[in-house]
Amino acid sequence: MPAHHRSDTSAAGCRETPARRRPRVHSASRHLPLCAGEGLADQRIVARTPLRVVDAIVSGVILYEETLGQRADDGTPLPQLAARQGIVPGIKVDAGKIPLALAPGDEITQGLDGLGRRLDAYKQQGARFAKWRAVYNVSDTLPSRLAIKANAHALARYAAICQEQGVVPIVEPEVLIDGDHSMARSAEVTQEVLHAVFHALHNHRVVLEHMLLKPSMVVPGKEHAQQASPDEVAAQTLRVLRRTVPAAVASINFLSGGQTPAEASANLDAINRAGPQPWPLGFSYGRALQDPALQAWKGQPANARASQHALLKRARLNSAASVGKYSAAMETADERG
């Protein structure tokens, strides 16, 4: 999912519960955000966070391959531990990005070889959904048409293989925030990318009702002089999504993509305040959810409780944003009570 802190363990990100029935990573009866975390420095920060709170906010967790086989202190496999808390375990299946040949500045995600066999093994270990991330660098000339088409093809092949194996695919085309590109350029690239992705998904016969989309919000490059307000982000993001994403898609769960925790919450809130859309609009955050917990933890077991509180506070704020009920004042409110 998002670019996260890399380690041997994992944590959660979130999405809003849809109002209609969806694949297993959803719940129609509770506000259960879709977990999208990878790489929280200590999985036990999540595992030991009070269950009465966690199972009301967190609905799934993405693990790395090495984490999928790890066990908690009492010997319980992590996927089983998550499932006991009502948290659906998933798995990151791509093998990372490499330069795209003969396309300077562009990148392609690898990992399709043997994917079907790996998914079968992951299912046996408890994984129920998967994630594949494609990245798109942005400039006046990037991404190239070759990069857009090649990554769309890879995402579609991945999704088709997942569905053939009975695994729900999360399709993640990330338009990177790095650079000084304008918001208009971000919108242009995002629209081209999503159009190509859904064209490829159609060609590969992917069932849209049985997949999740994890896109970027439309924001200017972080080095651009003119940054956007939450209302501007919401308007441009929804405009692009309505032009490119079929209503049949099960759910849209945004990545944070380098936004600060507060920015990611404020922008998600503005998107959900814009009124009903064809899809549930939630979140699947990595850094924007985990960074406050990591900062509180500092690698010290004595700070575990403070880290848990930081994680819960961020999850609650994003859960509120998922239904358009977040406010900046909530950032300074005491969430420990």
Image (cartoon, rainbow, N blue to C red):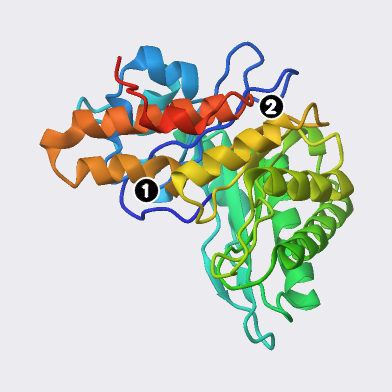
Which of pointers 1 and 2 indicates the residue nearer the eye?
Answer: 1
In this rendered view, identify the residue nearer to me: 144 or 153. 144
- The residue under the point 71% across, 43% down is 234
Label 1 environment density (alpha carbons within 10 Å; few <14, some 14–19, many ≥20) = many
Q: Please report contact status of discs 1 and 2: CB closer than 8 Å, yes or no.
A: no
- The residue under the point 46% across, 50% down is 260
* Residue 240 visible, this orientation: yes
**Type of amino acid under label 2:** Pro
Q: Which of marks 1 and 2 is nearer the N terminus?
A: 2
- The residue indicated by pointer 1 is 39
Which mark is drawn over residue 23?
A: 2
* Label 2: element kind: loop
The percent position of residue 110, horizontal first and vertical second, equals 59, 66
The relative height of residue 190 versus residue 240 in the rendered view (above or below) is below
In this rendered view, identify the residue nearer to me: 76 or 177. 177
Which mark is drawn over residue 279?
A: none
The percent position of residue 165, horizontal first and vertical second, equals 67, 40
* Residue 284 visible, this orientation: no
* Label 1: element kind: loop
User: Is 250 on the left-hand or right-hand side of 35?
Assistant: right
**Type of amino acid under label 1:** Gly
- The residue under the point 30% across, 23% down is 49
The relative height of residue 11 versus residue 86 in the rendered view (above or below) is below
The percent position of residue 322, horizontal first and vertical second, equals 61, 29
The relative height of residue 135 versus residue 36 in the rendered view (above or below) is below
Real-space Cα distance between discs 1 and 2? Answer: 25 Å
The percent position of residue 119, horizontal first and vertical second, equals 57, 45
Residue positioned most to the left = 302
